[in-house]
Amino acid sequence: MAVRAVRGAVQLERDDAEHMHEQVAALLTAILERNGLVPDDLISVWFTATPDLHSDFPAVAARKLGITDVPLICAQELDIAGAMPRVVRILAHVESELTKAEIAHVYLGAAGALRKDIAQ
């Protein structure tokens, strides 16, 4: 079993806690499903949010999914002029038999424009 890193992002339509929870849960679920993972495969998860998101911590969505024994941390993205607004990003460290090339990085909706080189 190897340790792998999986990236993902989603752009929110608005800064609203419930909307954030729904969208981040969908992103995290897609990351797990597309990589054949279960919550027990998670080692740790970093969440970042753009500076225009204030309604809640993105990690709350993971806790609502029942992911309670995995270290989670939230941070703020750099405030770069012209950057896509209202984006939550995930960097998950997982245990997996997948090779680096087989990892599916998940960018939902408009966030797919952020990393066209690795978005699945």
Image (spheres, rainbow, N blue to C red):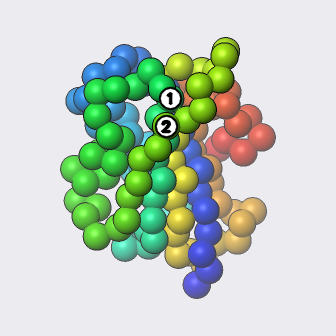
Q: What residue would you read off at disc 2?
A: 76
Q: Residue at x 67, y 41 (%)?
A: 119
Amino acid beneath label 2: Gln
Q: What is the x, y in percent for residue 97?
A: 60, 78
Q: What is the x, y in percent for residue 13?
A: 41, 18
Front-most of residues 76 and 83: 76
Relative to 109, is 42 above or below? below
Q: Secondary structure at mark 1?
A: loop
Residue 50 numbered mark, or none: 1
Alpha carbons under labels 1 and 2: distance apart: 6 Å
Front-most of residues 53 and 118: 53
Front-most of residues 60 and 37: 60
Q: Secondary structure at mark 2?
A: strand
Q: Residue at x 28, y 34 (%)?
A: 56
Left or right? Give the position of 15 relative to 98: left
Q: Residue at x 37, y 73 (%)?
A: 40
Quadrant housing residue 17: top left
The reply to whether callout 1 and callout 2 are in contact (CB within 8 Å) is yes
Judge whether residue 34 can be spotted in this image.
no
Residue extending furthest bottom?
1
